[in-house]
Image: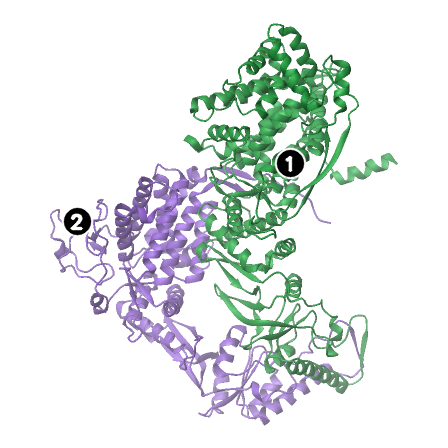
Amino acid sequence: MSRFEAKKPSVCESDPLKSERVRATLPVLKGIVTSCYGPSGRLKHLHNNVGGHVCTTSQSSALLGRLSVTHPVLKILTTSMQNLVSCFSDCGLFMTILCCNLIENGQALDLAPTTVIESNKLLLRLCTTYLKSEVCGCRIPVDFSSTQILLCLVRSILTSKPACMLTRKEVDHISALVLRAFLLTIPEKAEDSIILGKSIIVPLKGQRVLDSTVLPGMLIEMPEVQLLRTSAITSSSALKVALFCVSLSGDVSDTGEGTLAVSYGVCLERAVLDQLLDLGRQLVRDHVGLVMCQKVIHPSLKQFLSRHHVIAIDRLGVALMEPLSKMTGSQPIGSLGSVSLSSYGSVKDLCSATFGSKHFFHLIPNEVTVSSLLLCSRSDAAWEELKLTCQTALHVLQLTVKDPFVFLGGGCTETHLAAYIRHKTLHEPGSVLKGDGCSQTELQLTAEAFCRALESLAGSLEHDGGEILTDRKYGHCWSAQSHSPAAVNWPDLLSRCGCGSLSSQEQLSWSCLKSSYHPSMPPACLPQEAAYSSSDLTLDCFTAKLNGLQVAVETANLILDLAYVIEDTN
Amino acid sequence: MAAAGSVKAALQVAEVLESIVSKCVGPGGQQVLCTKSTGEVLLSRDGGRLLQALHVEHPIARLVVECVSSHLKKTGDGAKTFIIMLCHLLRELDAPTDQKKDCLAAGNTQAHGQHWKNCCQWKCISRALVTFQAQILDSFMDQCLSRHFLSIFSSSTKEKILCRSSIELLLDAYFSGRVGKNNHTFISQLMCDYLFKCMACNDGIEDFFEMVDIYFVELNVGVAGFPVSDSRIVAGLVLHRDFSVYCPADGDIRTVTVSGTIPPPFSTSGSEFVLHSEAQFQASQFWIMEKTKTIMKYLQSQNVKLLLSSVKQPDLVIYYAELNGISVVEYLSSEEISLIQRITGLSPDVPPQSYSQHEIFNIALVRFCKPLILKSKRYVHLGLISTCLFIPHCLVLCGPVQGLVEQHENALHGAFKMLRQLFKDHDLSYMAQSGHPNSTSSPLIDKSKESDPLPEVGNNSMRRPCEGTVVKDKDGLKSVQTHLIAHSNWEMPSIELETASPCPTPKMTPRTTYQTDNTMKHLSQDNTRIIDYHEPLMESKLTANSTTENPKIEMSPKNVQVTRNTGKGSILPVSFKSRESYYYSSSLSAGCVLPVGGNFEILFHYYLLNYAKKCQQSEETAVSMILANALLGVPKILYKYKKGSYSFPQIYVRTLYALQTNRPIVSTQTGLESVAGKYQLLSSVLQCLTKILTIDLVINIKRQPQIVYDEDSEDEL
């Protein structure tokens, strides 16, 4: 019998944004994410006081996934970020900070929330059309004939995660490896639709970061004994592969719903084992050189196979099955009976490899679409962070292949966009306004708040009390050292802009981000040569950032639109 | 523990609910965030969902929530309006309590205590409400309001062809009350596109909406993490599963659907399988394998490329499927299977035991079949070839958080429910009483003949002489008054003036806000005044007279005065015993709509006022007055934040003026709403109110109510 329990009435809170709880906690959350942002961001150390795993990170997914937020409004914000990161891997902090800024600025405005939401929507549309258009001055097309842009992109991602604890040299090494691992997953034969392969990250802790390497094909970890036993049989030639998804353990499989009466002396296990050995004989007859099984292989069968110089690898797990079957071209076999010849695949070579204290089988396929990235790091915490970063970088590279553009990083996209919005709303408000949702003045007020949110996002990159500037021609973001003398010669004090494409010697004029400066001209497009000349650009993923911007505005609008919070306390 | 069930308590409850709901109503409404202790977060502006999430404890509130949810089950719309209307009705009932008491339950109040006295009186009102809802509501819909209805079908042709622009207006209005203002235009556009993509032709619209309503869950996929603007429509059906085996194939793909495992089971339930030797075991296993092989071979020979299964198939089947180039999808839900069967027109499954015999597979054609990847989750995308009215399309709904995706999903589902309701014909049946201005034969007159010295005339023509008397006997005011008192139950001279003669209104339009405010004040007060003016009969009679003398007087204040008159008239305890009535049956035809923005409420209000003036029975008048005033509550909230000529008084006066002069009503808002929904809402609210009013005591019990019922029935036995 089910137990009835009286339901407690829910707690209903009106105007949640004005409540004390949110007023107190939202700035705290904002402080946490803002201080993590960028290459010079501060790390956060997460632990619980009963011991166990600790985590040092500055990445949004690792950080906010472990934090438990209490207020529902904050929960919306953090889940929104987590969902974004699960789709695009990158730009989680960007989205969270922007969203916090927008909420804060939107509330400070003395306008009805409806108006703020309406014009935020208009401004977002303005941004997305600009960023997707040809004239956009803060994105550059990716040139796939050279690796320079892609390398810069990966390097930017690695440097923006300081918890990986990488030196400059290590960053260069790892970014080259990540790019290589990615390039190995692209099939050589180009068809109309390309299906990318997979990069598998293999952990190798306790080694130097510079010992990390990338290998074509797949690495399967093995105990040393087995490796030694099988190394005798390995021949350096192509091998026929049989891949089993069905268990070869010799258990009696499903016998239906009815009862089974077995006469005395009849042993079903023996019957199944006989069947297995028959299968083994067939495999040997078919000249299979390598038998792999997702589940367990019966020791007798294993012994039988190794007697016939067939290598048997079991307990692969379901995760490896798909890349293995793709790589070898074999079909997972689900039958203990006769095996069709067409389900065998092949590998070009099989060798044993030893990295550090670990031993691996290295499967080298005929056509490489699977690569293994061996990642080394001294400490566990740094390895976790590095692994997450490499996964992000690989995903970002995939997204970049789909949408061959990159945004200028280092805050330049944000300040450039803000300058563009300012110009548009001041000089051509008619083109922005649609419908009678809000008036021109209201639009300008909210646009100012929107731009401030973007600019303070760019300003969050600076953590050492420096000054953030923007130039009046391109609208890029520049950072100056703190305690600069009052009357300064900016070109001498500044060196390069945030993304690294502009140098301070180019006859530019600057203004402080905090000062209100209203451009009369739309920000100029970056000269083509400037984008490609520098080998040290800071770049951001196009797809992730564009979606991050949209999600941030949508989430902020959602939160600004809340009238009540109903909390079910049951 | 027992608490008196009173209107006061109910009003308090309703006001609390109203304060929550009124912030979310209409295009300017805001969102509500509901959280559960499990960490689930849901955004909503759906009234029903909010009320459920509140877990209200108060018994009357629980009653209200129950009523709302049963209403929603029928229509899927109108929960917020329900609460607002109910609250205003209760307010109207509560306000003039003291006066009402005297008039409505004057006879039987002496012996009981105050509370019971109240209860009797509420009982009275609730009875009147029931009669109103059962008899008069339908006639109103049919006779008065129907001429204002617009149709969702385009009017140019005789056939019922859906007009895209009006559907757009309808959906726009619906979603502006359901999803955040951030997204409502986008969502309504999406839904509109979806509708017209899926609809094969205009016949059988009802079946179409029924199908979408039932299978809505299968027809959409939610993806969290993308911006809302990434939501889209994909042609074909998206199954919420991944391929177990995927073999790419071109051209039309032949498909079979199975509901059991393909190989024969080793042993079936209820039977015993006796094994004598190991060889026997191996042989039977071999036989199963061979059987599976031949079935799969057979499927391949039939050129079948896709196998849809509602259960998990053994590894064996998967292996042979791949060998034979057959893609496999497993674990399909029964809804998905039945949707596929309905779309493709396949007959239902054959029992799984008979798979081993061939020729029993039903083969359907699929245009394409490929994996669809959304946020690293893989789905099966099928291009079914439809044999019915529904051309399969799927909605991919995106949003930054799952809660928002769910909100959009629910809103879309609600919209389909609403449309399904809209395209149904609703029967209206009512009893028209002779008191109606339209009915000609009237036994009433015979009655009045006895009680009155007036000449015997038809009901319609009777007014004029009566009116004439008023005008003529200016000096002999007294005698007129007696006439009026005698007749006030079914007609007042001034009504004729207001409804039929357009002359007294020309000064109306250019009035400033000052004037309209004035009107409003009168209107809100008149209810309380109805009885106040009982005594100075003389005075108000005079105003009535003055109107007949001088029809060019301003319209709106007079309107109020007339109202007051009727109210007074109704109090007089004159009753007619035998009354003949006529049963009419008509229907609210499919696709009737009205412009949004409280138009329905104001129209209804207007006709109710007219009706109240003509009522014979005191209760009816009282009820119609209460209802008429309560109806205005909805537009009042809708226009709360509007200023200038869009403010509520302005719109109210404009609409009334248009009605009086028989001009078309100009709506300030674009957007349409279903009349059927409104009609059902009104009757549901009245039912709920009746329920509340008839309760006199709330008793708290410890046991489940069900047990109590059982005991009751035993007692009766």
Q: Quadrant of residue A141?
A: bottom left
Query: Viewed as shown, does residue B623 lie left or right of A131?
Result: right
- Point out which mark residue A320 bears: none
Q: Is residue B440 visible?
A: yes
Provide the chain ID for the residue under circle 2: A
Q: Residue at x 75, y 32 (%)?
A: B582
Place of residue B595 in the rendered image (x, y in percent of width and height, measured from the top left): 53, 40
Q: Residue at x 75, y 87 (%)?
A: B279
- Residue carrying label 1: B141
- Residue carrying label 2: A483
Q: Quadrant of the N terminus of chain B?
A: top right
Colour mode? by chain
Chain A's shade in the image? purple
Q: Is residue A32 visible?
A: no
Q: Residue at x 19, y 61 (%)?
A: A502
Q: Quadrant of residue B214?
A: bottom right
